[in-house]
């Protein structure tokens, strides 16, 4: 695997809306680092580096969070973005939650599905129906894809692709209880099969 990207952050000592508002006026973003065993560490980081790393890794790829303590000591921890809140007008981060991971243990993450190609059945007058924009995948953090591309070009009329048939990278598996349909092609006016 390639070396993980790193985001620098500092431990945050002050809390509350007033303090967080002052941080944001200084182009800093408040956040919380959650350990795998349930502890949390309040942090703050510069907005621009956070935005840049988020554009590269999104919510599914792991990266290093370098947390600087009050005494100047630093600890580097593998994390991924668990939750992010935005300013609806400016489109900037207002708060970010990081989740610490063990690089040797499997995690489960919702990953975006991107449908690629034009189905054979659509070229013959059918309609492509997609039922899911995301799927839950399980993998070690460094193996988790940012998104999954599903080629639907081979679908004929009245054919479907189920989650169990989705091609995935080595070391990655889909998590599901019932084998649901991701995409199907139907003729206009024909009765559609249920998504699950």
Image: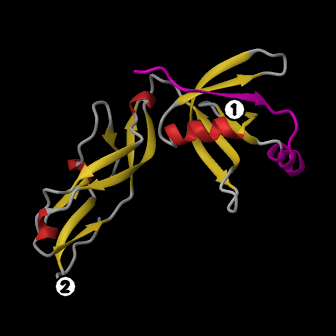
For the N terminus, the quadrant is top left
| Whole-percent x, y for residue 171 in the image | 31, 30
Residue 6: in magenta span: yes
Helix, strand or loop at disc 2? loop
Judging depth in this view, the residue of 81 and 103 nearest the camera is 81
Q: Is residue 186 above or below residue 189?
A: above
Q: CA distance from mark 1 to mark 2?
A: 54 Å
Residue 92: in magenta span: no
Identify the residue at image location x=45%, y=30%: 141
Around disc 2, counting alpha carbons within 10 Å, would you say few (fewer than 14), some (14 to 19), or many (20 or more)? Answer: few
| Whole-percent x, y for residue 118 in the image | 20, 61
Q: Earlier in the sequence, mark 1 or mark 2?
A: 1
Are dots 1 and 2 in contact, CB under 8 Å? Answer: no
Identify the residue at image location x=31%, y=39%: 173
Within the image, what quadrant is residue 134 found in? bottom left
From the viewer's perspective, is 144 left or right of 98?
left
Judging depth in this view, the residue of 5 and 67 nearest the camera is 5
Judging depth in this view, the residue of 64 and 36 nearest the camera is 64
Q: Is residue 55 above or below residue 69?
A: below
Helix, strand or loop at disc 1? loop
Around disc 1, counting alpha carbons within 10 Å, would you say few (fewer than 14), some (14 to 19), or many (20 or more)? Answer: few
Residue bounds of the magenta highlight: 1-25
Answer whether residue 158 is visible to the viewer in this image. no
Within the image, what quadrant is residue 146 found in? top left
Judging depth in this view, the residue of 94 and 179 nearest the camera is 94
- The dot on residue 189 is 2
| Whole-percent x, y for residue 9 in the image | 72, 29
Circle 1 sits on which residue? 39
Q: Nearer the viewer, mark 1 or mark 2?
A: 2
- The dot on residue 57 is none
Answer whether residue 113 is visible to the viewer in this image. yes
């Amino acid at each position: 695997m390639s070396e993980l990207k790193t985001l620098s952050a500092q431990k945050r000592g002050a809390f509350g809306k007033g303090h967080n508002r002052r941080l944001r006026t200084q182009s800093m973003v408040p956040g919380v680092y959650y350990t795998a065993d349930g502890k949390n560490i309040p942090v703050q980081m510069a907005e621009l580096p956070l935005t840049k790393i988020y554009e590269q890794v999104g919510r599914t790829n792991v990266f290093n969070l370098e947390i600087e303590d009050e005494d100047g000591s630093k600890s580097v921890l593998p994390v991924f973005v668990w939750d992010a809140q935005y300013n609806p007008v400016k489109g900037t981060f207002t708060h970010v939650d990081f989740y610490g991971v063990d690089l040797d243990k499997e995690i489960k993450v919702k990953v975006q599905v991107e449908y690629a190609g034009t189905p054979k059945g659509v070229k013959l007058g059918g309609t492509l129906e997609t039922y899911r924009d995301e799927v839950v995948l399980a993998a070690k953090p460094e193996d988790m894809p940012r998104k999954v591309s599903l080629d639907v070009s081979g679908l004929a009329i009245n054919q479907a692709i189920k989650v169990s048939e989705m091609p995935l990278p080595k070391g990655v598996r889909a998590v599901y209880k019932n084998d649901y349909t991701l995409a199907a092609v139907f003729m206009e006016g024909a009765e559609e099969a249920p998504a699950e």
